[in-house]
Structures are given as C-alpha cells and as structure tokens.
Image (cartoon, rainbow, N blue to C red):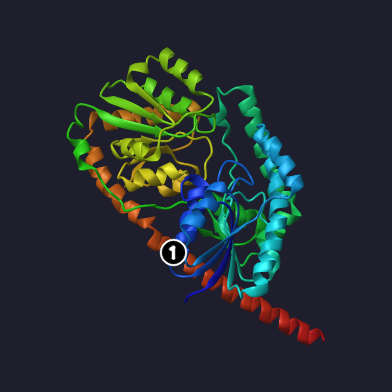
Amino acid sequence: MKKKILISAYAISPFRGSEYGAAWNTVTHLASQHEVWVLYGMSDNFMGDTQTMRKYVEETPLASVQFIEVQPGPLAKAITLLDKAGLGWFFYLAYYLWQKKALRAAREVLKTVDIDVVHQLGPIGYREPGFLWKLDKPTVWGPIGGMNIVNKELLKGKAFSTRLKFKVKNAINYIQLNYSKRIRKAFLQADVLVAATSAGQQTIREKFGVDSYYLSEQGIMSAAFLNESKFDHLNQQVQLVWSGTLIERKNLSMCLDVLAKVKQNNWILHILGDGPLKEKLQRKAVELKLSNRLIWYGHIPRPEAIRVMSGAHLHIITSIAEDNPAVIFEALTYGVPTLTMDHCGMGNVICDKCGIKIKLDTYDSIVNNMSAALESVLANPHKLVDLAQTTLICAAEHSWDNRLARLNNMYEEAIQIREKRYNSSFKLTTLTA
C-alpha cells in the first residue's frame, strides 16, 4: 500500500558512498512505491554544505520525492568551524542543534501533509537520535549503529593517542548507553527499531529492554556481476584488494602484518584509498619487505576503483571498528569473497559462502590465523573460483528488492503498534475520566 513517508537523512548524495549513498539508495528505492519527504543538511563535506544536492535536485527532480534542505542555525555553523578544524567531537553538539531545526521543519510538513510513517534514518549512530519521535506519528528508527565496544587486542601496538581515543570512545559509549535519559526515551518511543548489526540488537535488548530488527544500512547498489576472465591467470598470481581510508580505525597495518607472515609469493595487493598514515604505512611495508607486492592507488575515481575491485580474487578487511562498510557490499556485488575478522557488521554479512572469517583472539593469534587462512587459499587458488560463484548468491540476499520488502513490513508494523498505543491510551483516559 502506498504511503506518505517523512525521512530524516541528514547526509545524502547520489555521488558519494558510505552513509550518503546508503541514504540516497534508501530514499530512491522507497520512492518507487511511496511518496517521500526528506529532511537533509549535508551532501558534501560538512554540515550546511548542500550545494551538490541542491544542484542535482534542480537538474534531476524525482517525481515522488520532496527534498527539504535544513540549514544549521548560527550557533551550529560556528560549532561546525571546530569540526572543520579537525575537532570532530564537536560535531555532535552541532548535530543536536540541527535536529532541533529538523523537528521544526518536520512540523511544517505535517501542517499540509498527512504523513503515515516517520523514519529517523541517518546518520547511523545512536548518540544523537533526533526528535522526530515527538511528532506522535508511527516511527521507525534505524539502522542504528555505533554501539560497539572496541576490542582492546586490536589496539595493541597502536600509538598512545590512538589507544586513548578508542578508550575514551568506549567510556562515552558506556556512559551514554547506561545513563542518557534522552537516548533511552528515543529508544522507548520509537515503534520499530532497526539495528545495523546483531551485536547492536543484543545491546538494545540489554540496555533498553526492547527488541529490534537486524538490517544493515548498506545494500547491493547495482546488479551483481562476475568478471570470469580474471581467473585466466589465477594460478600465476592471486589478486588481493584492500580498500579504505588510511587511518588507524581501518587498520591496514594489521593487513601488512598478516602478509608479512605469508610464505607464498603468488600474490599482489591492490590498496585503494589515501589518508594521513600513508607514508608511515609505506615505510612499514618497506621494513617488512612487502613493497614489491603492493600497489598504492591513493584516492581514485569510483569507476577506476570498481575496475580494481571487480578484478580482484579476494578482498581483505582488517578494521578495528565498523558497522557495515560499503566496500563489503561492493565486493559482494562483483563476486569477490572477503577475508575478515568475525566482528562488527562484517561478522553478520560474511559467511563461509562469501568469505573467510577469523575469530577474535589475541592480536598475534588473529594475525597468525588470518595468515594461515590466506596461505591455504594461495596454495589452492582454484577454491576462489567456487567461492566467487557462491558470493554472488549471497549478494542476492542484500538486493534492494529484499530490503524494500523488509522496510515495507517495518512501516506496516509501526503503524499497527502506534494504533495499539493510541487505543490503549484512549481506553486508559476513558477509564480515569
């Protein structure tokens, strides 16, 4: 049944990945079946930077979508200057103020449109749940992420500043999940909650006593495709790929430690991405005698990055903390299995049909086990041919047809739950009158 849906997306863009792309794909696919109103505040690098989205909407309007630009107020703009200066923690205060304006914009929409469902879509983090639950409409919140506690073993060998940063983040997570009244109220007021990971589901149940659905924020963005010609020279050389920003959280350093223990020499690693740690990581590669087996691409246009990814035989991800990185789904799209640790969103998405998962343990054990798994694949590269085929099957599970069907069911459930809440409240009011 066609519905009128109000969405708060904050960051959205048809040209970018991560949460921008996740919001864009959610909105455009919903628009194929529903009427959608979208509140947003960023399409470029910082809050209030909406020029790309504004230009796109003017040139390519979508018939079933109304995009409503919510610009930050003067104080939020001033705080954003600190974010631009690299003090990222101040973002949450600015985002809190932006959500206040988004609520006012939502109330303006409700003056002229009988909205059926409200969806607090993004950003994915639980820290700032917004205020749309105050609209007294059927409300869906999620996918919700950012609740994971970083495993201390994955911080071994990191710089003091990095270890301190993640320890502070762990402490803040503990405090907010246990003591924030506003966050608790948002969790309890939403009619349907959606967790981005199964670990998130467990946290929501433990901290707030309510159930949630599991659905990653990302999905398969295009038709799955396998470039079978890449297997022509598989026996001579296995093409590995690592993709991400070169920062501590993405943890390319661990990938290098893993490769340093590999005895076979029938591999090459393609590194997609750039970042502040590039020179440090390149020096480490030299020290580990890996330089002649690494190709550093830096930040390249998306079509070129896709060409590299689709030509790979195995994708490696070694992140310290993630919810659901878009690169996992890009790898699935092109039939590229993934070698990963069994944690975060990767632990949910990857199975033995589309990759290899290594259990969390001590840092050295993880490195040794990941290296051993890679040794096995390199000694028997034909396994990657079969794994590529089953990876495509797994990709179908994350298609947008499936995701859209699940979202529609959630919206229906939210409407039913809200109706029950209203009827219960009405009966209680009548009995006490």
Q: Does 122 sit left or right of 94 as displayed?
A: left
Q: Hey, which quadrant is residue 308 in on the image?
A: top left
Looking at the picture, does residue 151 appear above or below residue 220?
A: above
Q: Position of residue 343 (x, y in %)?
A: 48, 42
Q: Position of residue 148 (x, y in %)?
A: 58, 44
Q: Amino acid at mark 1?
A: Leu
For the point 53% across and 29% down, the residue is: 247
Looking at the picture, does residue 72 appear above or below residue 211?
A: above
Q: Does 75 sit left or right of 174 as displayed?
A: right
The residue where tag 1 is placed is 404
Looking at the picture, does residue 243 appear above or below residue 416?
A: above
Q: Does 372 sit left or right of 246 as displayed?
A: left
Res. 358 in view: no
Q: Quadrant of the C terminus?
A: bottom right
Residue at the extreme right of the image, as rendered = 433
Q: Does 77 sit left or right of 10 as displayed?
A: right
Res. 83 in view: yes
Looking at the picture, does residue 239 appear above or below residue 349?
A: above
Q: Hey, which quadrant is residue 191 in on the image?
A: bottom right
Looking at the picture, tell me which residue is in the foreground, 71 or 252: 71
- Give the total number of marks visible in the rendering: 1
Circle 1: element type: helix
Residue at the extreme left of the image, as rendered = 232
Looking at the picture, tell me which residue is in the foreground, 404 or 172: 404
For the point 49% across and 60% down, the residue is: 27
Q: Position of residue 45 (x, y in %)?
A: 58, 41
Q: Hey, which quadrant is residue 236 in on the image?
A: top left
The 10 Å Cα crowd at callout 1, few under 14, some 14 to 19, many 20 or more, is: some
Q: Position of residue 355 (x, y in %)?
A: 34, 42
For the point 48% across and 70% down, the residue is: 34
